[in-house]
Image: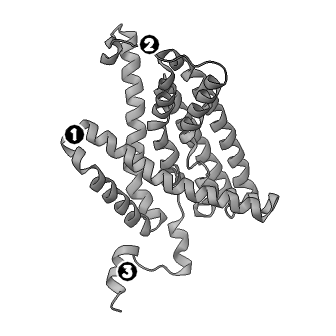
Amino acid sequence: MVLGLPKRLLLGRQLRSEQLHETLLPKTLALPVFCSDPLSSVAYATEETLLVLGLGGTVLLGLTWYIALAIAVLLIVVIASYRQTTYAYPNGGGAYVVATENLGTNAGLVAASALLIDYVLTVSVSVVAGVAAITSAFPSLAEHAVAISIGAVVVLALVNLRGIKESGKVFAVPTYGFVLGIYVMFGFAIVRLVGGASVHAESAQWPLHQAGNYTGLALVFLAMRSFASGCTALTGVEAISNGVPAFRKPKSRNAANTLLMMGAMSVSMFVGITI
């Protein structure tokens, strides 16, 4: 009884078994719950690609298109694969379940280990990237970046303790707001281009200095590293296949359709930002 009130504040009210259907998610809420990770990753995936290519000088930036196209194709393939998984494993089938059943326990453990590392890095990198964007807009907050990052992680943890549906309602606004903001930015850029306005960044006028030439294997490895860094756009894609039981009926179909919507938005935003 002593812990009753704090527990209810953190976790919400208890539900009877017959009430569990009330927590099932429609596609509109499932999208921000399961797809906020892959959708938000496009905000820094292109940047990571450019940072690596920039080591070889501005000439190598011309490879950005090819690397972005390869990442987009890989993302489409992964999404198509997980759409099949949602039908094959209606009770939830992420990398661990699929690898264990088809390749054995050791393969499943490797997949699970990779997922644990991925989840930790996803939280840290996503939060830091978001805080970096905030502090770039408001430089006075730069000295508090660490505190803001820790606070954001705590808030995310507390919100998720309330349950999937409750967290979905909270995450829906920022997730859809982010997607809308990206597409508005695309529209604004198209209008400016059609109107003949200059879209060159101020840095385009900066003087250039000679950089070392990368050829042969050095160029190949640099391109591969850039591709690997840009694959941050793929983080979190498997979340929907893990969460099929959380969808409303028909579960597999709704999960597959949500994956399709997520894929269309992720690919279009990633390619658009790269352009």
- Residue at horizontal 59 percent and vertical 32 percent from the top: 227
- Residue at horizontal 53 percent and vertical 53 percent from the top: 34
Report helix, strand or loop for mark 3.
helix
42 lies above or below 53: below
Residue that badge 1 annotates:
138
Mark 2: amino acid: Gln
Q: Position of residue 200 (x, y in %)?
A: 35, 14
User: Disc 1 or 3, which lies upstream in sequence?
Assistant: 3
Q: Residues within 10 Å of mark 1 (few under 14, many from 20)?
A: few
Label 1–label 2 contact, CB within 8 A: no
State left or right for residue 226 relative to residue 88: left
Label 3–label 2 contact, CB within 8 A: no
Confirm whether residue 259 shows in the render. Answer: yes
Q: CA distance from mark 1 to mark 2?
A: 34 Å
Please identify the quadrant where the N terminus is shown: bottom left
Q: Identify the image quadrant of residue 87.
A: bottom right
Q: Identify the image quadrant of residue 161.
A: bottom left
Residue that badge 3 annotates:
7
162 lies above or below 204: below
Judged by depth in the image, the label closer to the viewer, 1 or 2, is 2
> What is the residue that sits farthest to the bottom in this orientation?
1
Judged by depth in the image, the label closer to the viewer, 1 or 3, is 1
User: Disc 1 or 2, which lies upstream in sequence?
Assistant: 1
Residue that badge 2 annotates:
210
Mark 3: amino acid: Lys
- As rendered, which of 39 and 165 lies closer to the eye? 39
Q: Position of residue 248 (x, y in %)?
A: 59, 60
Report helix, strand or loop for mark 1.
loop
Q: Position of residue 43 (x, y in %)?
A: 44, 37
- As rendered, which of 225 and 140 lies closer to the eye? 225
User: Disc 3 or 2, which lies upstream in sequence?
Assistant: 3
